[in-house]
Amino acid sequence: MSLSDPVYIGLLLLCVVLFYLLRVGQPRRVLLLASSYLFYFQLSHYYIAVLLAITAISYFGARWLRAPAIGSRGPILFTLLCAIVLTPLLLLKYLSPVLLAVGGGTAFGHLGHELVTLALPVGISFFTFVALGYLVDVYLEVVDPEMDASRLALFLAFFPLISAGPIERASSFLPQLDLQQRFSAERAFAALRLILIGLVLKLCFASALFVPIKQIYAAPQNFSAFEQLCGTIYCAFYLYSDFAGYSLIAIGSAKLFGLEVRPNFCQPFLSASVPEFWRNWHMSLSSWVRDYLFSPLRMTWRRSGNLGLSAALFISFVVIGVWHGPQWGWVVFGVVHGVLCIGSAFTLPRRDAWLKASPIPGWLVYGWRVVVTFLIVELTFVLAWAKSVPDALHMYRSIFSPELFRNIAAAPGWYLYHKGGYPVLVTGERWWVLIGLLVAGDILARRKFKWERVPLALQLCLYNIALLLVLLKWLNGLGNEPFAYYKF
């Protein structure tokens, strides 16, 4: 069941009604925990055993870590607990590609083929990182071990977040699980608005943008250089609308229960540098890697100066790439972004100083940086989305060839006169209109636009249009399409 499925929305609203009818505290936790386990069982069936095992290890392991008798053995126990929590993820997500790569026709290669047939538990990358973060926080005494098993279980399994995050922290989420909240019409309206925007992004934007992406990336050699470039741009905005849509539905769902969840996106395509892009894109993952991997490595290697900083950045981005998947494309994606961020860290102060001293207007500098950052980031998505390394290389050769400029020069003629090789995938107005709306929405959000400034009549009109579009998509059977990040 997808979060954009009308069945999910119906069950969510039923759960909300029951939640506020129950007494505060434990009865509400039992309701949410039972709903979460039923939801996850529907998604992954018997793989719920993985979630239950990680929950038990996290609960008992955290208590052991802070037991007085553990003494000097704390670091050994902490390392062992982290290894155990990571084991299901490593076995189910990463072992088969490694065995296939090194095993060949041996017994290891055969085992790799057998492991490929196993389904990957939905959300395993997300709830594994949540559990790891909890254990690290307990070990570093950022939080105390949770003594109520139901609270910790709900923290790891809360159904709006279990399949694709955001990746929550124990210090901010666990204190909210007293569940003392009273119903608030204002909060409920804000939550429903987030859910509606998320549904529109998923069903109306992401579903439409995926159509040309599927065709172009399936056989890039059948399309012109311009079409391949446009397919890459579509891909970026598809991922954005799909994952941002999921995040808004998840955040809105949690808000209906009075639970505040960290944001996942903050206008990433208006970023003026690659590091800024990562501060605004999949924020719960990038901040998790920053706090639990980059910062400890940076502190460990602080005496190594720039070399230590570079190594910490590089390892952090390789982990981000590998987290997305064991394919070489994602590994190279992480390596490239690591190199880009290292370069930015050492050159940005000088570039800023030079541009500040130049007569170029600030708005022009910012616009140029946004465009260049956007193009750099979009080109790296080719590595992740191409079916194979040869396909990725083919697309790069096409995009950086003279053919691209010939295609661009011919595009107005194609569009105006529909002559000779009219590239429907490039000039489909609806896709560019959708991208324009996404960019315009981000610009308004960046400028702190207040929705309350819109006249009430216009607000109601826009809400009704959005709701009608969602209902039409549901009637066309698009509600149960999986989100892109479910497979991560």
Image: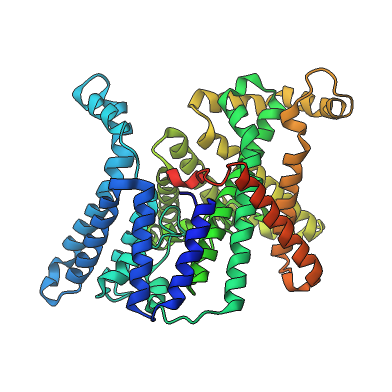
Q: Residue at x 48, y 26 (%)?
A: 388
Count of number-bearing discs = 0
Q: Is residue 377 left or right of residue 427?
A: left
Decide: is 313 above or below 302. Answer: above
Q: Position of residue 286 (x, y in %)?
A: 48, 56
Q: Position of residue 79 (x, y in %)?
A: 22, 58
Q: Position of residue 310 (x, y in %)?
A: 45, 51
Q: Is residue 430 left or right of residue 205?
A: right
Q: Nearer the viewer, residue 317 or 87?
A: 87
Residue at the limit of the structure toward the right, as seen here: 417
Q: Nearer the viewer, residue 339 or 195?
A: 195
Residue 231 visible in the shown view: yes
Q: Residue at x 66, y 40 (%)?
A: 208
Image quadrant in which you'd find residue 156: bottom left
Decide: is 258 above or below 223. Answer: below
Q: Residue at x 30, y 68 (%)?
A: 152
**Structure colour scheme:** rainbow
Image quadrant in which you'd find residue 112: top left
Q: Is residue 365 left or right of residue 78?
A: right
Residue 283 visible in the shown view: no
Q: Position of residue 289 (x, y in %)?
A: 42, 57
Image quadrant in which you'd find residue 487: top left
Quarter of the image containing the C terminus? top left
